[in-house]
Amino acid sequence: MMREALGGAWLATLAATTLLAAAAPTAKETGAMPKFTLTSTDFSDGGKLASAQVFNDMGCTGSNISPALAWSGAPAGTQSFALMVHDPDAPTGSGWWHWVVYNIPPNVSSLPAGAGDPKKALMPKGAVQARTDYGTVGYGGPCPPPGKPHHYNFKLYALKVPKLEAPDGASGALIGFNVRAQALGEAQLTGMYGR
């Protein structure tokens, strides 16, 4: 009797587990992508961005130097990378694009500090820096209005295409749409800054 009761309980648990597993959404269904690692020697995840990274205009007095970035563990099949830096807290209704780079070759695994300045020519050959919401090409650092610190999400996407096509002057949102459509995986690092 006890044996039958235990057997029945085991079968009920197995059936419930099987149903839950069948009902659980897959990564494709949830939009989740495989993760890999993005780091910086200039700030830690969740840490404060330094004045070196802050914009130098519109009431801000930073050096506007893009931080050094390095990554590892990209998924197999990666043919290029794209970097999207966005502030979702900007009071615009759509956030603020601070840095948009695509067509980073698949053999590249880092960007040096200052690579976001097109005049320095520190980007790898073939990489394209797009226009930010400041209206300029290259890195545009944080410059939030006074108040709570903002989140600056540095997202690096591993893409399944060697080259992303985008019209000259394309917005960060348009490039972001194309990037996400071609993404195999993503890595994220968030910096904070307020004044």
Image (cartoon, rainbow, N blue to C red):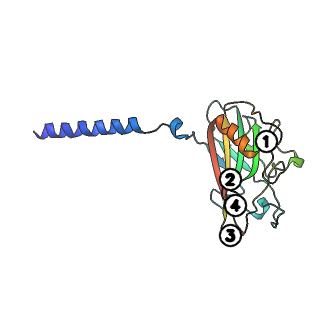
> What's the amino acid at mark 1?
Ala
Query: Going by the image, does 171 lie left or right of 39?
Result: right
Q: Based on the displayed image, in which of its 4 quarters is residue 144 positioned?
A: bottom right
What's the CA distance linking mark 4 and mark 1?
Answer: 21 Å
For marks 3 and 1, give the one nearer the viewer.
1
Label 3 sits on residue? 147
Q: Earlier in the sequence, mark 2 or mark 3?
A: 2
What's the CA distance linking mark 3 and mark 1?
Answer: 31 Å
Q: Quadrant of the N terminus?
A: top left
Q: Earlier in the sequence, mark 1 or mark 2?
A: 2
Q: Secondary structure at mark 3?
A: loop
> What's the amino acid at mark 3?
Gly
> What's the amino acid at mark 2?
Ser
Label 1 sits on residue? 170
Label 2 sits on residue? 94
Query: Which residue lies most toward the right here?
Result: 119
Q: Secondary structure at mark 2?
A: loop
Q: Secondary structure at mark 1?
A: loop
Q: Is residue 86 above or below residue 179?
A: below
Image mark for residue 91:
4
What's the CA distance linking mark 4 and mark 2?
Answer: 8 Å
Question: Could you tell me if the residues under marks 1 and 2 are in contact, i.e. CB atoms within 8 Å?
Answer: no
Query: Is residue 179 something one can see in this rendering?
Result: yes
For marks 4 and 3, give the one nearer the viewer.
4
Query: Going by the image, does 60 lie left or right of 89?
Result: right
Q: Secondary structure at mark 4?
A: loop
Image mark for residue 146:
none
What's the CA distance linking mark 1 and mark 2?
Answer: 16 Å
Q: Based on the displayed image, in which of its 4 quarters is residue 6 positioned?
A: top left
